[in-house]
Amino acid sequence: MHQIKPDIEALSKSILAYAMERLRMHPPSIDHPLPQTTLEALAGQTITAEGLGGEQALTLFIETLAPACISQDHPRYLSFVPTAPSEVSTLFDLVVGTSNICASSWLEGAGAIYAENQALRWISDIAGFPAQAGGAFVSGGTAGNLSALVAARHDWRHQHPEHATKRGLIVSSRGAHASIEQAAHVMDADLVESGSHQLTGSDVAKTIAALNTEDRSRLFAVACTAGTTNLGVIDDMQGIGDVCSKERIWFHVDGAYGGAALAAPSARPLFDGIEMADSFIVDPHKWLFAPFDCCALIYADPVKARKAHRQHGDYLEVFYDGTWNPSDYAHHLSRRARGLPFWFSLAVHGTQAYSDAVETTLDCAREAATMIEAHPNLEMVTEQRLSICVFRRKGWSPEEYRAWSDALLERGDGLVTPTKHEGETVLRFCIVNPRTSREDIQLILDTL
Ligand SMILES: Cc1ncc(COP(=O)(O)O)c(C=O)c1O
């Protein structure tokens, strides 16, 4: 099973040939999902006692399964938060797979962890984090937010043993991503919403002042957002940081989407104050040109996180000899070196290319906003922020938005799904792909 026999040699050529063909597609076919019953009819039972054999299983994937998945890297995929991995990061993902590295501990994965840590260092530097900052790559923003908040709660309980049995409380905002609420749910903590679309220092101060003594004693973190998913709003980092440091509360920044813009000189001032954060996440699989799944989770003081997350067991103690173990910094143990494709691309292209690529997407979003304003049937709903444009098609009902979106995908022209703003159904572009051009935007706008 684990020897390269001639048939596996031939299969490896087929797999690599397909991978290269997919990589060369610019743009790839956007494709669309198929219902379960259609897939059953087309693909049938894919796992059998005898096995399909490599070529048949690969053909099944190429011809039936892959076309039933939307290509996130299509330049007119502008929904949710897309992804646009660089070619070299995607290629290096193949290498990560074949290298079979367990990047939990320095003992097992020193070389990979060394490289991942340099990629984390670059992010720490653009955020202005201190020299001792560090963390780990986890699967995504949801996992990153949870792990950071678990560390925050552990630190609060450690600092305040008198409150150790209490249910914790987190202050967050209306624009915060659903994963913050989910983290509170998983942790059995309470969540208090503060502010409006942009959370400010004075919102947080007022919310804290309004808490009764018991609730104030349970407050262990403020979770703010550097680039809300729906609108691209960056909370008032400076103001919130000041309040958190005065009140001695953990300051967490969810930059899963927007944190990438730290690399863009034109957007960097919007993040001022982020350097005060205790923890910060950004997803390279969103706007930093890495393949799924990859979230950089960084702590200003990693020792606090280690105290919360280190797992103990007779067979594990050999790891703990003063070396750096990524397993210590999140809710995980075994882990793929998922930061390596991102590191490889940074190492190949250099950081300037990253700044340039993020600036390109910001320019495209600004231009898209201008084109929307100039369109007779459209109007911007909120100010264009980061790489997001939220706009309405005048006079359309929710059903008309949905029908238009479905038809766009059906024609293979793009994916732009409706969202809501203040209860109104509207449209939203989120541009993270430097290959998304003015012509791509025009093609979509022409159908509105
Ligand atoms: C601001 C923000 N936080 C967290 C998440 C969750 O990230 P993931 O889907 O990688 O778990 C997202 C996803 O879009 C996001 O935009």
Image (cartoon, rainbow, N blue to C red):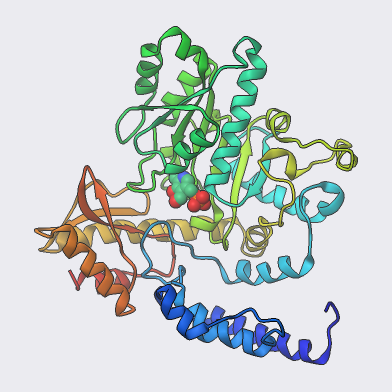
Asked if residue 68 shows in the view, the reply is: yes
Along the line of sight, the residue nearer the viewer: 207 or 371: 207
Q: Is residue 158 above or below residue 386?
A: above
Q: Residue at x 61, y 35 (%)?
A: 129
Give x and y (percent) for residue 31. 41, 77
In the rendered image, residue 393, in percent from the top left (x then y), is placed at 15, 60
Q: Nearer the viewer, residue 67 or 221?
A: 67
Is residue 388 positioned above or below 50 on the image?
above
Quadrant, the C terminus: bottom left
Q: Residue at x 66, y 55 (%)?
A: 339
In the rendered structure, the answer to whether residue 115 lies left or right of residue 247 reads: right
* Any part of residue 29 in sight: no
Q: Residue at x 67, y 45 (%)?
A: 136
Q: Quadrant of residue 322?
A: top right
Q: Position of residue 357 (x, y in %)?
A: 48, 61
* Residue 217 vs residue 352, the one in the foreground: 217
- Where's residue 251, x and y in %? 52, 27
From the viewer's perspective, is residue 287 above or below residue 313?
Answer: below
Question: Which residue is at 35% across, 26% downward?
Answer: 194
User: Considering the image in quadrants, where does the N terminus appear?
Assistant: bottom right
Count up the numbered dots: 0
Q: Does 176 sit left or right of 189 as displayed?
A: left
- Please tell me in which quadrant of the rendered image residue 97 appears: bottom right
- Horizontal relation, residue 335 to residue 35: left or right: right
Q: Nearer the viewer, residue 334 or 221?
A: 334
